Amino acid sequence: MELTPDQKKYAVDVTVALVVEELAEQFHEEPTKMLKKFVASRTGALLYDEDAKLWWDGPSAIAEMYKHELNEKG
């Protein structure tokens, strides 16, 4: 069964919410601030790239990818 574009968008949005919730808790930061940082990141952009299908990996894997990105930046 193929997902519709709306279903894919919803799945990505839910994944972003779950990732941001996890990261906000780990970094002791307000979710709205964490959301802005995450969406502006390379990982956040990749999550919205439909061809990458990153949202299939799940929130914890994506959160780890974001933390790795932060470590690369120093």
Image: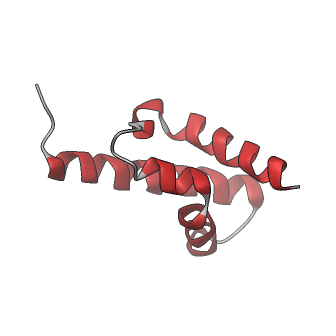
Outermost residue to the front: 51
- Please name the residue shown 83% across and 48% down the image: 71
| Camera-nearest residue between 64 and 21 | 64
| Camera-nearest residue between 4 and 13 | 4
| Residue 22 placement (x, y as % from top left) | 61, 50
| Camera-nearest residue between 53 and 32 | 53
| Residue 47 placement (x, y as % from top left) | 46, 48
- Please name the residue shown 41% across and 40% down the image: 55
Q: Is residue 36 above or below residue 7?
A: below
Residue 40 placement: quadrant: bottom right
| Camera-nearest residue between 38 and 73 | 73
| Residue 59 placement (x, y as % from top left) | 51, 41
Q: Is residue 25 left or right of residue 70?
A: left
- Please name the residue shown 33% across and 45% down the image: 50
Quadrant of the image containing the C terminus:
bottom right
- Please name the residue shown 39% across and 49% down the image: 49
Q: Is residue 32 above or below residue 73?
A: below
